[in-house]
Amino acid sequence: MERTEDEWARIAGYVRHTLNKLASQPLPLCLPGEPQECGKTAREHVLLWSAELKAVAHDLIETSAPTREDAVHYSGPLYRQTLESLRGNRGARV
């Protein structure tokens, strides 16, 4: 999907904000133009932080589900169903 650098930066900010609410360590202000700029593009931050968010979400499922079977259901079939729905919606917009 084609996005401008400003759009990538906005999305990266959203993902960082979400991770800062859920993860144990706050993320630095290191996007391009921020005080602790690290040299990665906003798009690279989206990819990096989205992978971290996926791991945090998976851990949240595992530690919150009342049973192992529930954790498997939420992180397996339900996750795949939701992902397929997102992909289907994205395809319809293209």
Image (tube, rainbow, N blue to C red):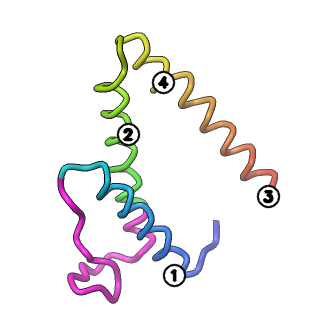
Q: Which residues are magenta?
A: 25-46
Q: Amino acid at mark 2?
A: Ala
Q: Nearer the viewer, mark 4 or mark 3?
A: 4
| Magenta span dominant secondary structure | loop
Labels 1 and 4: the sequence-earlier one = 1
Asked if labels 2 and 3 touch by Cβ distance under 8 angstroms, the answer is no
Q: Which percent across, then down, holds residue 56? A: 32, 42
Determine crowd level at label 1: few under 14, some 14-19, many 20+ residues with C-alpha closer than 10 A: few
Q: Which percent across, then down, holds residue 94? A: 79, 60
Residue at position x 33%, y 78% from top?
31
Determine crowd level at label 3: few under 14, some 14-19, many 20+ residues with C-alpha closer than 10 A: few
Real-space CA distance between mark 1 and mark 4, rounded to the nearest whole angstrom: 34 Å
Q: Which residue is mark 4?
A: 74
Labels 3 and 2: the sequence-earlier one = 2
Q: Is residue 33 above or below residue 53?
A: below
Labels 2 and 4: the sequence-earlier one = 2
Q: Nearer the viewer, mark 1 or mark 2?
A: 2
Q: Which residue is mark 2?
A: 57
Labels 1 and 2: the sequence-earlier one = 1
Q: Which mark is residue 93?
A: 3
In the rendered structure, the answer to whether residue 54 lies left or right of residue 83 reads left
